[in-house]
Image (tube, rainbow, N blue to C red):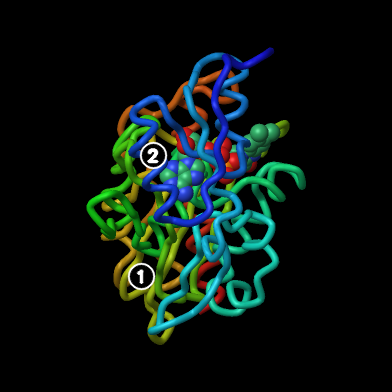
Amino acid sequence: MIPAAFEYVRATSLDDAVAKLKAAGSGAKLIAGGHSLVPLMKLRLSEPGTLIDISRIPGLSGIRESGGKIEIGATTTHHDIAVSKLLRDKCPMVAEAAAEIGDPQVRNRGTIGGSIAHADPAADFPAVMLAVDADIIIKGKSGQRSVKASTFFRGFYDVDLTSGELITAVQFEPITSAAYVKLHQRASHYAIVGAAAALVVKGGVIESARVGVTGATTHAIRLPGVEKALAGKKADGVAAAVQNAAADVPDVNVDLHASEDYRKAMIPVFVRRAVERALGRS
Ligand SMILES: Cc1cc2nc3c(=O)[nH]c(=O)nc-3n(C[C@H](O)[C@H](O)[C@H](O)COP(=O)(O)OP(=O)(O)OC[C@H]3O[C@@H](n4cnc5c(N)ncnc54)[C@H](O)[C@@H]3O)c2cc1C
């Protein structure tokens, strides 16, 4: 399949990317790894007039720690996240989720910024960003702003981002008592159901929990009922606390990979596995 004709320009800096977005108007799209956008263009589901390549902007990729937070630049590839020693030591869930994305080609080109901007309902990073309570850092012509992951993901391929803006980074506090597990679709590795849990644990008791799921509905969401039920529980109380996890999920997805009933059955199973793995790390 051949995409519709388009102009291609390469941004040399963040300011240049913002200026090029403004100049090209609503027909422009950013391209980072291209692993979600190019398939859509080939199917002519997306026909941008101009592609603005942000993949080589100096400083836009990389993983660093400062001021007690970990920051991952938007064009950091899934592979670089998967092998990051900083993440493996201080927030292993994020590295492990990256290592489970797609295949080596996808991990070598796909970026975290592209993944969360695209917000595929079955993508892994959105659930993980919800569980670490990430701040999404966004730049546009009116300056920089920061949005919590909990409000960034709004609906089916719908995020809090306007056409003149780009994601520059995600930031979150390190947490080791966290885990991501998924039931993956065998060919693509996208999540049929994926669950990310981040726990604050004292003396074997869960003080608080953040639980995100993906693949389950139109977009990644947190599970407030499960989070509430987990507070105050020890390991032997986890199964009961998560058994109604599917009740927190509206409009459960149905597709050729899984029926509504199957997903509803798998949601508590994978939430429980994520919580138990996170608890085991506390
Ligand atoms: C075969 C295959 C298997 C896959 N399996 C998985 C999987 O198991 N799990 C999973 O989570 N994903 C999977 N993916 C998706 C993959 O992770 C993509 O790389 C990712 O979703 C998009 O990142 P990208 O850098 O390629 O974005 P692109 O394709 O370049 O862009 C995607 C969208 O995001 C926008 N965008 C890109 N960067 C930014 C930015 N910094 N700011 C604002 N907007 C931006 C673009 O304009 C475009 O609309 C798979 C993809 C393929 C092709």
Residue 133 x, y percent position in the rendering:
35, 63
In the picture, measured across the screen, residue 16 lies left or right of residue 3, that is left
Residue lying furthest bottom in this view? 203
Residue 132 x, y percent position in the rendering:
41, 64
Nearer the observer, 200 or 147: 147
Q: Of circles 2 and 1, which is in front?
A: 2
- Can residue 282 be seen here? The reply is yes
Q: Residue at x 40, y 69 (%)?
A: 172
Secondary structure of the residue carrying tag 1 is: loop
Q: Quadrant of ligand 1?
A: top right
**Would you identify the image quadrant in which residue 253 lies?**
top left
The three-letter amino acid code for the residue at tag 1 is: Lys
- Can residue 183 be seen here? The reply is no
Q: For the residue carrying disc 2, how many other residues have a C-alpha within 10 Å: few (<14), some (14-19), or many (20+)? A: many
The three-letter amino acid code for the residue at tag 2 is: Leu
Badge 2 or badge 1: first in the primary sequence: 2
Residue 26 x, y percent position in the rendering:
34, 27
Q: Residue at x 55, y 14 (%)?
A: 44
Q: Residue at x 34, y 30 (%)?
A: 25
Mark 2 = which residue? Answer: 21
Image vertical order of residue 11 relative to residue 236, above or below: above
Q: For the residue carrying disc 1, how many other residues have a C-alpha within 10 Å: few (<14), some (14-19), or many (20+)? A: some
Mark linked to residue 233: 1
**Would you identify the image quadrant in which residue 131 lies?**
bottom left
